[in-house]
Image (tube, helix red, strand yellow):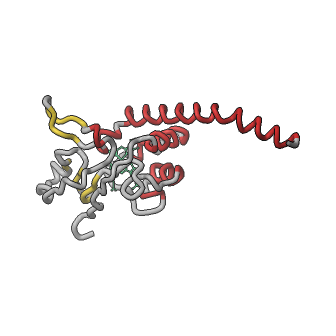
Amino acid sequence: MTRSTAAFLALTLSALPALAADLSHQARRGEFVVQTGGCNDCHTPLRLGPNGPEPDLSRMLSGHPETIVLPPPPTLTDAWNNVGSASGTAYAGPWGITYAFNLTPDPETGIGKWREKDFVQAIKTGKHLGVGRPIQPPMPWESYRHLPESDLKAVFAYLKTLPPIRNKVPDYVPPKGK
Ligand code: HEC
């Protein structure tokens, strides 16, 4: 073993536990931001419990359930111009109809194939994956984009630790005439 290989190995080995500890610390921070940022309020469906509607934690952060096919929203007026579904995951308003996205790491229907930078850019720019169509209300990306980048990365690290849930959220429906 040459001196430089030995030095490299020593460096790698000593870095490993520190990195792992750092990762779980990062995910814990992400969990805190998710809890205090209210992501569950829109991205976790409600179900009826003994004391009324409660978050269905078996489907935590998996977005609007594909099994809940909604009728068209009620007629809205200038005074009451937006509504939410009973599940707390679908919204209608001047922007059309939006369904909260599946934030679990399922590769086909969630963020499983997203890279950290896709997530960070989505929140910072308000565009799908950071490059696509504008992210519509009521997703409050304009508030979250002020979070330090380290917190956005922490949220992504935390989301990646969730059990992946296969749930294909319906597509965004733009307002009529647009
Ligand atoms: C008030 C409701 C609400 C809250 C709170 C909320 N979201 Fe959302 N979110 C939505 C809706 C609705 C969509 C779908 C918007 C669309 O289709 O244009 C969405 C979409 C997303 C997307 C998909 C973006 C893309 O590229 O398509 C991500 C990622 C996301 N939210 C992350 C979060 C995180 C992380 C939090 C908490 C820090 C959060 N959301 C809090 C309602 C919400």
Q: Relative to 102, say whether 133 is above or below.
A: below
- The spot of residue 56 in percent (x, y) is 25, 39
Number of marks present in the image shown: 0
Q: Quadrant of residue 31?
A: top left
- The spot of residue 37 in percent (x, y) is 38, 36
**What residue sits 34% from the left and 48% below the top?**
165
**Horizontal placement of 57 versus 9: left or right?**
left
Name the outermost residue toward the top. Answer: 51
**Horizontal placement of 136 versus 150: left or right?**
left
**What residue sits 28% from the left and 39% below the top?**
58
**What residue sits 18% from the left and 48% below the top?**
85
Task: Specify whether residue 98 is in view.
Answer: yes
Given residues 138 and 59, the one toward you in this image is: 59
Task: Specify whether residue 147 is in view.
Answer: no
Given residues 34 and 141, the one toward you in this image is: 34
Given residues 45 and 37, the one toward you in this image is: 45
**What residue sits 47% from the left and 44% below the top?**
156
Q: Relative to 132, say whether 104 is above or below.
A: above
Quadrant where the C terminus sits is bottom left
Given residues 71 and 93, the one toward you in this image is: 71
Q: Quadrant of residue 39?
A: top left
